[in-house]
Amino acid sequence: MNVDPNAFPQPGELRGIEHAGVIDLLTHDAASGQVELVMFEPRAWDGGEEQLFQLQEKMNAYLSFALDGEMAEAHPELMGKPLRVVLRCIDTPPDEAVEFLTQVREQIALQDIDLEVRYAREGGCGTGCGCSNN
C-alpha cells in the first residue's frame, strides 16, 4: 500500500499528537534507507499548555518506541537504518513548542536520530529547530 507521508489524518482517524499511544506513520525509503516516524498535528497551534503537553507525550512515546526495542521487535528489518522523527503540522509551532523541539533535537542527535518539523504554510521560525516547509 502506498501511503502519502505528507497527508494529514482524515476526520475520525485516531492519529495526531493528541493520541500519544499511536504511531501515526512509519515510512522506509528503500533507496536511501531512511526510516521516518511521522507524527501529525492537524490542528492550528493554540499556544496552550495542553497542546504542548500532548506534543511532549507523543514525542516520549515515539522515542520510547525507537529506543526501547519496540521498533526492533515489530520491524527488525529496519534496525541499523538512519532514523528521523518528523512532526507534520499546519504552521510554525509557538515559541514554547519550538524551544521544546530544539532541546529534543539536540538530545536525540546523541542517539543518531534526527528531528524535523514540516509544515504546510509558508514561513519559518528561523530558530534551528529543524523546521522546513514541505
Image (spheres, rainbow, N blue to C red):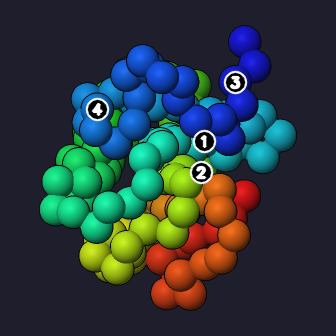
* 3 is higher (above) or lower (below) than 28: above
Secondary structure of the residue carrying tag 1 is: strand
- Mark toward the start of the polypeptide (4 vs 1): 4
- Mark toward the start of the polypeptide (3 vs 4): 3
Q: Nearer the viewer, residue 30 or 37?
A: 37
Q: Crowding at label 2, few (<14), some or many (≥20) Cα neighbours within 10 Å?
A: some
Residue indicated by mark 1: 35
Q: Which mark is residue 82?
A: 2
The amino acid pointed to by label 1 is: Val
The answer to whether marks 1 and 3 mark residues whose Cβ atoms lie closer than 8 Å is no
Q: Quadrant of residue 96?
A: bottom left
Front label number (3 vs 4): 4
Q: CA distance from mark 3 to mark 2?
A: 20 Å
Secondary structure of the residue carrying tag 4 is: loop
- Mark toward the start of the polypeptide (4 vs 2): 4
Q: Which mark is residue 19?
A: 4
* 70 is higher (above) or lower (below) than 110: above
Residue indicated by mark 3: 3
Secondary structure of the residue carrying tag 3 is: loop
If the image is split into quadrants, where does the N terminus sit? top right
Q: Crowding at label 1, few (<14), some or many (≥20) Cα neighbours within 10 Å?
A: some
Q: Is residue 80 visible?
A: no
In the figure, is residue 2 to the left or right of 92? right
Front label number (3 vs 2): 3
Tell me the residue at 72%/58% (across/down): 134
Q: Is residue 16 visible?
A: yes
